[in-house]
Amino acid sequence: MPNETHAVLYAVDGSIATLTLNRPDKRNALNEAIIEQLKILLRKANDDSSIKAIIITGAGADFCSGADLSSLQKISTASVEENAADARALLELFVLIREVRVPVIAAVRGRALAGGCGLATACDLVLAAATARFGYPEVKIGFVPAMVTAILRRNVSEKRAFELLTRGLEIDARTAREFGLVNQVFVDEDFDAEVSAYVVQFEKISRSAVGLTKALLYQIDGMAFRQAIEAGLDANVIARMTEDCQKGVARFLKKE
């Protein structure tokens, strides 16, 4: 494992786990250590049956400014195989976020740029401070925000995705919300409290039901209508057999 043992901090409050990118002096720029520790800690939270939601945020002023300088320097001298292995580490992180059973929520202050914007986009939900900034500036240096394209295209319209990916511009939080990139925008002064109030709602909801819903939602990407409905049937049957559903139905019938 990379040497930066505290590149990501892990904390649990009730049933909410928070993963904090911890390189504030580098604007939480992505490197091997951050990516590897995010994967380890996401799996840790996923394996903890008491966790109902995961927040990913950044220490200091910014969420994440993208790849760090040393990572960019490697690109110009690495072989095809080395570049592929490096890119695959980020691919595995994006896929893992969708495979984790509970909601993964990006809480974005400051800048979320390049790979940092990709990380936020890869999360199930994005909450932003009003002064947050988002953007994919990779094309300015001849690079491509490649893997996040598959996710972004599922979040925003084709025209918006093209605009965001090819112009390399930063947009503010409210514009990002209008585009469909952000779920909620909160004023900076109340951001932490608003994020907590938003996320804590998952403590009141069935973990198994949310997990099945998340899996179904992403499973039906690219499916034909009939196939997607059949996948819904499978999820419906599985949900009926869960302890949460059986207890929930019993409580409802008792109230009636």
Image (spheres, rainbow, N blue to C red):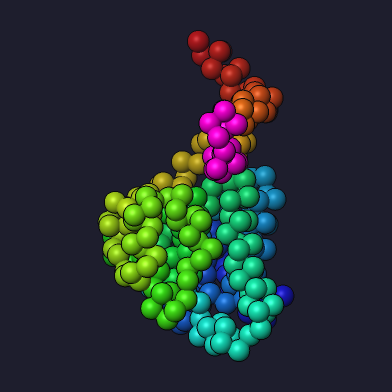
Query: In terms of depth relative to the viewer, which is nearer, 198 or 136?
Result: 136
Residue 177 placement (x, y as % from top left): 32, 53
The residue located at (62%, 50%) in the rendering is 100
Q: Indicate the quadrant where residue 132 lies.
A: bottom left
The residue located at (50%, 85%) in the rendering is 69
The residue located at (50%, 50%) in the rendering is 124
* Left or right: 231 in relation to 29: right
Find out whether residue 225 is within the magenta segment.
yes
Quick check: 239 above or below 201?
above
Query: In terms of depth relative to the viewer, which is nearer, 14 or 47?
Result: 47
Quick check: 112 above or below 12?
below
Q: Indicate the quadrant where residue 11 lies.
A: bottom right
Query: In terms of depth relative to the viewer, which is nearer, 189 or 88?
Result: 88
Residue 38 placement (x, y as % from top left): 61, 65
Residue 187 placement (x, y as % from top left): 28, 57
Q: Which part of the image, by quadrant, shows the N terminus? A: bottom right
Q: Which region shows up in magenta?
A: 215-229
